[in-house]
Amino acid sequence: PDPPSSPNAASRREAVRRAMMHAWKGYEEYAWGYDELDTIGLKGRDDFSGLGATIVDSLDTLWIMGLKEEFARAADWVEHKLSFEPDTGTTSFFETNIRIVGGLLSAYYLSGDRMFLGRAQELADRLLPAFNTGARDVTFNNDIDITTGAHRKSFGKTLAHWGTIQMEFLALSRETGDAKYWDLAGAPIQALWDDDPATGLLPTRYTPGWRWIVARARNKSTPPAKNGSPSPAALRGDW
């Protein structure tokens, strides 16, 4: 590849910047404040609970590309218009964390503006009721109404549910001084290690104690091997 200082690299960077500006201007003109732009209908639509996903997703890109005027308009919207009381019912904890909480934290780290940190913490606090899943389940329920805190029980959660929140929630604990975020995010990782410390072999969709559950379902009377290796029944049933 061309070194960063080469003319080719510079022209390619500028081409990417122009493409971003083209997309951003279309969004500003036709869909400002909506989650995304319907490029065929030239109108906005909310497919992500009305959290202005495109604006929040784009904050770090605007900053890195030096589009400071565009960034300032987006920041003003986040501060004064972004509402965490959407009318669309439940939202995905997984997506809300990585896109909205993560986007706000990225903007905070890049710009130093603590407004973004405050808004990220406000939203994260609205996600916390999803962790009320019972004593044996240290993960979260994915479908949550961030207005009321109501959430639906999730079964057989994907490994991404266990591992997706560590970066954002650790950043929240570090920057706010409140350990509760990391305590909640760290528990699933510890549970993974405790469940199969020897092999690390886990199914795509995971339930705590999965090897025992599969063995019982197949009328196996013996527990998994003492060395921590997955049972053949578990591998057949879950992978």
Image (cartoon, rainbow, N blue to C red):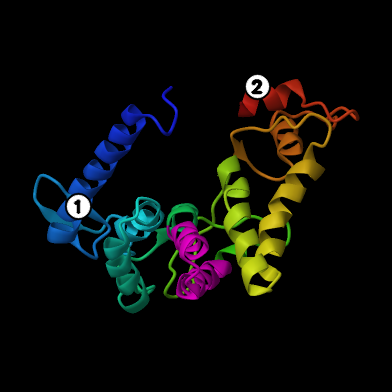
In the image, 17: left or right of 216? left
SS state under label 2: helix
- Name the residue at 32% across, 38% down: 13
Please tell me whether mark 1 sits on a helix, a strand or a loop.
strand
Q: Earlier in the sequence, mark 1 or mark 2?
A: 1
The kind of secondary structure the magenta stretch mainly shows is helix
Residue topped by disc 2: 236
121 on left or right of 237: left
Three-letter amino acid code at disc 2?
Answer: Arg
Q: What's the CA distance linking mark 1 and mark 2?
A: 44 Å
Residue 84 visible somewhere in the drawing: yes
**Residue that label 1 marks:** 37
What stretch of residues is rendered in magenta? Answer: 100-129
Give the image quarter of residue 81.
Answer: bottom left
**Residue kind at label 1, given as amino acid type:** Leu
**Which quarter of the figure is the N terminus placed in?**
top left
Counting from the top left corner in percent of width and height, residue 75 is at 35, 69
Residue 42, position as x, y percentages in the image: 9, 52
Q: Residue at x 32, y 27 (%)?
A: 8
Above or below, 16 against 78 in this view is above
Q: Quadrant of the C terminus?
A: top right
Q: Quadrant of residue 80?
A: bottom left
Residue 138 can be seen, yes or no: no
* Placement of 78 over or under 34, stated as above or below: below
